[in-house]
Image (cartoon, coloured by chain):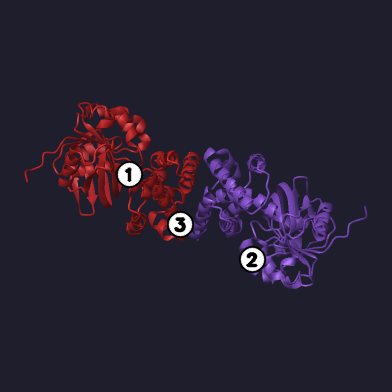
Chain colours: A purple, B red
Amino acid sequence: MPPIEFQRYAVIGSGAVGGLYGGLLAQAGAEVHFLLRSDYEHVAANGLQIETPTGNFHLDNVHAHGSVDSLPACDVTMVALKSTSNDRLHELLAPTTRDGGIALVLQNGLDVELDTANVVGLDRVLGGCCFLCSNKLGPGHIKHLDYGRIVFGEYVQNHTDVTERVQKIADEMNAAGIDAHGTADLAAARWRKLMWNIPFNGLSVALNASTKVLVEDPDSLHIVESIIEEVYEAATAAEVVIDPSMKEVTVEMTRKMVPYDSSMRLDYINGRPMEIESIIGNPLRAARKLGVDMPFTEMLYHQLKFIEQTRA
Amino acid sequence: MPPIEFQRYAVIGSGAVGGLYGGLLAQAGAEVHFLLRSDYEHVAANGLQIETPTGNFHLDNVHAHGSVDSLPACDVTMVALKSTSNDRLHELLAPTTRDGGIALVLQNGLDVELDTANVVGLDRVLGGCCFLCSNKLGPGHIKHLDYGRIVFGEYVQNHTDVTERVQKIADEMNAAGIDAHGTADLAAARWRKLMWNIPFNGLSVALNASTKVLVEDPDSLHIVESIIEEVYEAATAAEVVIDPSMKEVTVEMTRKMVPYDSSMRLDYINGRPMEIESIIGNPLRAARKLGVDMPFTEMLYHQLKFIEQTRA
């Protein structure tokens, strides 16, 4: 197999997800440009430190950018900032996508690609779901704890197979040791991930508990399972096919997971905005349009909005 | 009108409710025996201090009892301890009801009369709902903040009118300045009160907020109103007639209420068991038997059980 010729990548939002995947691509030899904010000075001076379950490495020379002005046009721009900052996407995405490059949206939730599509157009947007436990421990310091799969595909699903440009990125990611899979059914991946994200992100804040506690206590488990059922029913109404065994698998996977604070709980604990709308509000509204009630999810949504409002 | 000849009363559980109503009856001239636990020494030595919106008074000579052994047989025993202590009812009720006296259950929730009926028999049980804001500020010190109505009647509803014994107690309470009303439809009063108790007791703990905050924030208000609707639907299924305007009245009343910590929130804050089963679990199970889903109420129930379990 000839040595792979990587495309040029940009990472907008170089946190636990963007920093990890971008770091792995750079370690494999790709040219990866990282847009940083508070970590810029540190990473420009010291590089990136990445810990993974299979080994740690340090990237000495990182293409670190403290502002969008120095970013080059790239083939692939990974959108990995929190969706609560999406009002800044026009400013952040314009430079790297100016020559027709595509955007790969790695944000949590449903229809989070729309904000990116408003900048680059629907035909240049891919979306991806990351099934991983990863935290940023400090400036330029990422710790990947468990799992790691990324499933991504075209946001506009008018292809029956994985498209060429999706497969090309998947191949490059695989070459970098990332468990990446192209899909022709992004919606299924999105809803599949919501089965975890809605109950475990939401309840970890509403009940102030780790994922481990949530699956071990019978009362919180009842709520978790009820929400998973609601998400499954909404996905079915959206004509997304998910194997029903996934409901139980989602709980079992969490039972075996390294004890973990969800991204929403970390946001809550650290006083950052929570991704309530993208993770819970958007699926709730999509289900309502399809005539599906999600009462547990709806109550959780309003509890989280209440918590966000009253903590201020 | 001839001077009233009061029956002999006992108060089992001399807290914010039992202490207030028993104190008002005693102040009016009734012989009222108070069973006390931690407050016994203080009340035996210093009497009861009662503050009300219309004036304060002090009862110097109180029939205070530190154990059931000294309690006489009484005509009416008010059961005003928390329902979480109902496993002690056999021991606590036997002395005062030994000569055929009746029990008036002033506990929160639905079907809380059954534990008392197990001791004295169904035909000797009355139940009552107290619509009041009252707190115990310290040993023998009750502060009645707002409202004060008590609506009570036969637990076994095979009478079309208010029974003689219910009216007799109502007359005595009225003579003592208590806003007491006999009813032939205790179930309606119970469900009517649950429309307040379930959302405001439950959410004040689950969302850690006062009643004032719960009605002012639009997201918590949405949950409050959804739960009120569920309780109304369950009551309707139970063939209880409640005027639909009561749904809005319940919220409006709370909006105008003196800012208030619900009894469940005070229990939570002070590390005491919460009345989750009587206030929320029993109505939920009653509704389920009638084929009515109460999803918001169900989620709240499991959240509270989780909170009670994990705080330990």
Amino acid at the residue labelled 1 = Arg
Q: Nearer the viewer, residue B293 or B302?
A: B293
The residue to which callout 1 is attached is B190
Q: Is A272 situated left or right of A7 in this image?
A: left
The tag on residue A86 is 2
Task: Say yes or no: labels 1 and 3 on the same chain.
Answer: yes
Q: Secondary structure at mark 2?
A: helix
Amino acid at the residue labelled 3 = His
Q: Nearer the viewer, residue B185 or B115?
A: B185
Q: Secondary structure at mark 3?
A: helix
Of circles 3 and 2, the one toward us is 3
Q: Relative to A236, is A82 above or below?
A: below
- The alpha-carbon separation of the residues under discs 3 and 2 comes to 27 Å
Q: Dots 1 and 3: beta carbons under 8 Å?
A: no
Residue A257 appears in the figure: no
Image spot of residue A252 (x, y percent): 65, 39
Chain containing the residue with disc 3: B
The tag on residue A304 is none
**Callout 1 crowding tier (Cα within 10 Å): few <14, some 14–19, many ≥20:** many
Of circles 2 and 1, the one toward us is 1
Q: Is A126 situated left or right of B4 in this image?
A: right
**Callout 2 crowding tier (Cα within 10 Å): few <14, some 14–19, many ≥20:** some
- The alpha-carbon separation of the residues under discs 1 and 3 comes to 23 Å
The residue to which callout 3 is attached is B222
Residue B53 appears in the figure: yes
Mark before the other along the chain sequence, 1 or 3: 1
Amino acid at the residue labelled 2 = Asn
Quadrant of the image occupied by residue B140: top left
- The alpha-carbon separation of the residues under discs 2 and 1 comes to 49 Å
Task: Say yes or no: labels 3 and 2 on the same chain.
Answer: no
Image spot of residue B89 (x, y percent): 32, 30
Chain containing the residue with disc 1: B
